[in-house]
Image: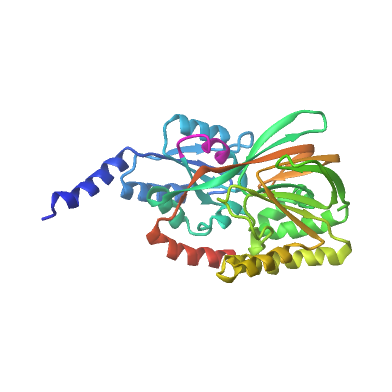
Amino acid sequence: MSSPSETAPAQSDALASEHRTAAVVYNPVKVDLPTLKQTVERYQREAGWNETLWFETSEEDPGGGMAREAIAAGVDVVAAAGGDGTVRAVAEVVWESDAALALLPSGTGNLLARNIPAPIDDLSASVHTIFRGEDRPIDIGTVGVEREDGTREEFGFLVMAGLGLDARMLANTNDDLKKKVGWLAYVDSLIRSLRDADAFEFRYRLDGDGNRSVRAHSLIVGNCGTLQAGATLLPDAEIDDGVFDVVVMRPRGFFGWVRIAARMLWENAILRSFRRSALGKTAIGKRITTRAREERPLRYLRGEEFTARLERPDEFEIDGDPVGKIVAFKAAIHAGALRVRVAGPRDQTRQTRQVRAAHRH
């Protein structure tokens, strides 16, 4: 027979679970709803949680309004089932509440899931995390943009925001091709975008430290740095370090772009691993990584607040979604302001293997 001290924690956990509720905000185009509901109901029942609440997104509302309804209903966790747009729309609401964000990746990029990292192609593991996972605080960014006509809007973002070539590429992406071949559609768009990849001029201020003028092809403010196909854009970026990593791309001709591609697809990943190693943390190692970052086609900056004003309007993107042309923006970081559900210790080893395998594709 179990002693009272052995049964009390179990009883306490059971009572806590009985009063917990999750909500799923899902994009009906991106998910297999019957399978998703069946999986959620199984793990919800096993964990002893209340019935899960379901909210469907629409073309007019990618998830923000549904997340507000879920928060108003008093849920403990809001799971975003869809692409990066759904995740961002839900996170914009959740970070200012007492609830946590959970990820049910279903899109092409799944950029936040790649950077946490979290399972991408394992629905059972993702759903299990909703009910059995732990909360991890991560940073979230906000960015206010100014349009050509003087109107202003504010967005939240989790991965990165930027303008120039990457934003033009997203604006030029063929949606039908994207549905057929996934992230490879961006390659087609990139080739078309390079045809008009004229550099742009802008003035920027980092953490209030004066104004500087730059001519570049792309400007990206990032909260984390891993993209699709294992590409690493920002080797120093951490999702919970309380600062932005900014990269300014200014290549000279075709070989400049080749150099940038080599950095993103190969060298930055090596640099990131080296920086985390024992040698990388020494004084010599830090000098090596600092010199490796100082390269003409790429300029890296770090800070908590970044403001830029363009000489002429250009396309802007947030977490992989085009938001149209802007003339200025101001980005700020909110350290540890968003809680995200991640796998518990017993699940992390198995999920890490799965994530690494998925990210190689």
Residue 313 horizontal side relative to residue 119, left or right: right
**Residue under the image location 52 percent in, 37 percent down:** 94
Report if residue 161 is visible in the image.
yes
Q: Is residue 360 visible?
A: no
| Residue 107: % across, % down | 60, 52
Farthest bottom residue in view: 279
- Left or right of 21 on screen, residue 113: right
Task: Judge whether 288 appears above or below 43 on screen.
Answer: below
Q: How many labels does the image show?
A: 0
From the top left corner, tell me how far across and down residue 23 is, in percent.
Answer: 45, 39
- The residue segment tinted magenta is 90-99
Q: In this figure, which colouring scheme has been used for the structure?
A: rainbow
Where residue 41 appears, as percent x and y from the top left, is 38, 47
Q: Write the residue at 54% across / 55% down.
A: 116
The reply to whether the magenta stretch includes residue 179 is: no
Residue 247 image-quadrant placement: bottom right
Residue at 54% of width from left, 66% of height from top?
Answer: 356
Comparing 54 with 288, the one in front is 288
Quadrant of the rendered structure where residue 249 is?
Answer: bottom right
Q: Quadrant of the C terminus?
A: bottom right
Name the spot of residue 221 as percent of width and height, x first: 70, 48
92 within the magenta span: yes
